[in-house]
Amino acid sequence: MPSPDPRPRGSAGPLTELYDVALLDLDGVVYLQEEPIPEAAAALNAARAAGMRLEFVTNNASRRAPEVAALLARVGVAADPVEVVTSAQAAAALLAERLAPGSAVLVVGGDALAGELTDVGLRAVRSADDDPLAVVQGYTAETGWRQLAEATIAIRAGALWIASNGDATFPSPRGPLPGNGALVAAVATATGRSPDEIVGKPHPRLHQESVRRSGAQRPLVVGDRLDTDIEGAINGDCDSLLVLTGVTTPADLIAAGPRQRPDYLAADLRGILEPHPTPTLVPGGAECRGWTVTADAGELRLGGQGLPIDALRALCAAAWSVGSGAEKIVADGPEAESAVAGLSL
Ligand SMILES: [Mg+2]
């Protein structure tokens, strides 16, 4: 039976008119590591000009807010540091709630993470011999075996364990690289324990902090990852836009489970400036702006013509409503073959 609220959804006007604040993921959305993503800066500047406020929300714990704002400026996006919310800030805020002022916290991460702890009145230490009451773990490229060993010793001695985020990977121009979740997994394997709390997306704390700070009434989460940005939006009861400039491929999107399906999808951030077509559910499939998809016997059969992104919208609508999400994609005709090839399906 079709869902009463099928996704992806349409919008009568541009998303900038329907939502007051965009809660933007950074890596894979605005930039790839330090390289600008084409069209992103112009789209964000246009969104601001249209009256939408921007909040930059990152699971990355390796930079402080002013550094993130400076990096945004280098890729062409003017941002005030107060518009930046990092998982390191959220982790420090959580530890300040749980521990007495001046308590020692073992940092497995960079100086940015240590600086956030100092700012909330905690004492950042680097050795388990300093008797830390907690371990905070956030990504930095400098983390090696020695830091993981200190964390293992402290956690085995009973320290509270907070992770900035659980991302298995982050995107790079050379493909996905090991993220904080991969390093957390090493410590989990060594200790037989899991972190007591993970603050980053898809967990609610970072997201709640962004909504609280911005005072958003109708926030729109914008991200490139299904298992952090989109699942986090759904966990926070927020609408979401998935952009295909980061780690998620069209095939991943079609196969997404119910907790990881965005409201809207777009090739890049220009999707925030546009109205979105509404896919229509039809018996056994879906249609979207010139395309028809039929789910049958383990196949999603695409026919018609139009823009490749609308073909993807029709494929997602069909896979998410009547399909299993694991079907083979079959193209009917040269236009459909071209769209399927363009989407790398
Ligand atoms: Mg991302």
Image (cartoon, helix red, strand yellow):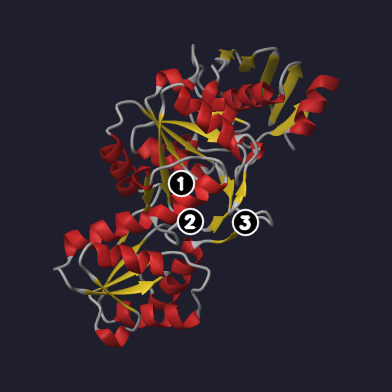
Circle 2/circle 1 CB separation < 8 Å: yes
Label 1 lies in ligand 1 vicinity (Cβ under 8 Å): yes
Q: Amino acid at mark 1?
A: Thr
Q: Residue at x 75, y 38 (%)?
A: 344
Dot 3 crowding, Cα within 10 Å, few <14, some 14–19, many 20+: few
Q: Residue pushed farthest right?
A: 334
Kindly report the distance in space between the C-alpha atoms of the residues bearing marks 3 and 1: 15 Å
Percent from the top left, x then y, of residue 291? 70, 16
Percent from the top left, x then y, of residue 44? 51, 32
Q: Amino acid at mark 2?
A: Asp
Q: Is residue 126 above or below residue 296?
A: below
Looking at marks 2 and 1 on the same chain, the residue that comes earlier in the sequence is marked by 2
Inspect this view and state whether residue 26 appears.
yes
Q: Is residue 322 above or below residue 108?
A: above
Q: Residue at x 65, y 21 (%)?
A: 310
Dot 1 crowding, Cα within 10 Å, few <14, some 14–19, many 20+: many
Kindly report the distance in space between the C-alpha atoms of the residues bearing marks 2 and 3: 11 Å
**Across the whole image, how many numbered discs are drawn on residues?**
3
Q: Please name the residue that numbered disc 1 is placed on.
A: 228
Which element is circle 3 on? loop
Residue 176, which numbered label?
3
Q: Please name the residue that numbered disc 2 is placed on.
A: 167
Q: Is residue 267 above or below residue 179?
A: above
